[in-house]
Image (cartoon, rainbow, N blue to C red):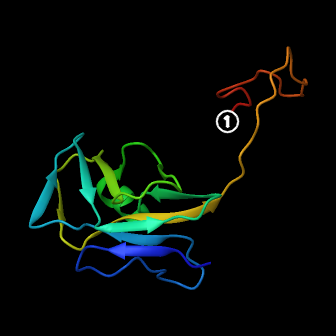
Amino acid sequence: MKVKIVNKSTLPIPEYKTQNSSGVDLYANIEGEIVIKPLERKLIPTGIYVEIPEGYEGQIRARSGLALNHGITLTNGIGTVDSDYRGEIKVLLINLGKENYTIKRGDRIAQLVLIKYEKILFEEVEEIDETYRGTGGFGHTGK
C-alpha cells in the first residue's frame, strides 16, 4: 500500500527498521533541544504530513526503549491520526521518570503504525446477551 507523505523537515522520512517491523520511527523536528522535566508534557513536531487512506488509522505509539530506560511515553497512551487529518504529525510526550530528559533534533521519539479499521453502526436495544463473565471487571479473575 502506498501512502502519500510530505516531509517539511530535513530529517529522513519514516522507514521500517527491520523486515517485520509494524511501526516506523518518527523524528523530533526541532531546533536546538527540548528538556522534559519529570511529570512534564511537551508537544514535539515531526515535520511529517501523511495522507492516511480511508479505512485506516494512524496510531502514534511510544518507543519501548525510551519508556523503559527513561520513562518517556505518550501522554494519551496511543495517539490517533484520523484519515481526514492533514496537519503535521506531532507527538505528545510525558516524562514519567525521575530525571530531566533532553530531546535533540533528529531523535527518534515515537512510532507510527497504520491500522485498518471498520466503521460500526450502533443498534440501540433494551438489553444485551449474557456471557459467563457477565459484568466482572477490573481484577475479577484474580492474579
- Camera-nearest residue between 136 and 130: 130
Mark 1, residue position: 143
| On screen, residue 84 above or below 124 | below
Residue 48 left/right relative to 41? right
Q: Residue at x 45, y 54 (%)?
A: 85
**Residue 69 location in percent, x, y?**
33, 60
Farthest bottom residue in view: 19
Residue 97 left/right relative to 104? right
Q: Looking at the rendering, which quadrant does residue 129 occupy?
A: top right
Assess disc 1: are there few (<14), some (14-19) or many (≥20) residues with their C-alpha within 10 Å of its C-alpha. Answer: few
- Camera-nearest residue between 10 and 139: 10
**Residue 30 location in percent, x, y?**
17, 65
Q: Amino acid at mark 1?
A: Lys
- Camera-nearest residue between 115 and 94: 115
**Residue 63 location in percent, x, y?**
41, 62
Farthest top residue in view: 126
Point out the image quarter for the N terminus.
Answer: bottom right
| On screen, residue 63 above or below 126 | below
**Residue 127 location in percent, x, y?**
86, 17
Q: Secondary structure at mark 1?
A: loop
| On screen, residue 15 above or below 35 | below
Point out the image quarter for the C terminus.
Answer: top right
User: How many labels sit on residues?
Assistant: 1
Q: Residue at x 64, y 27 (%)?
A: 138
| On screen, residue 109 above or below 100 | below
Residue 41 left/right relative to 114? left
Q: Residue at x 83, y 28 (%)?
A: 133
Residue 140 left/right relative to 131? left
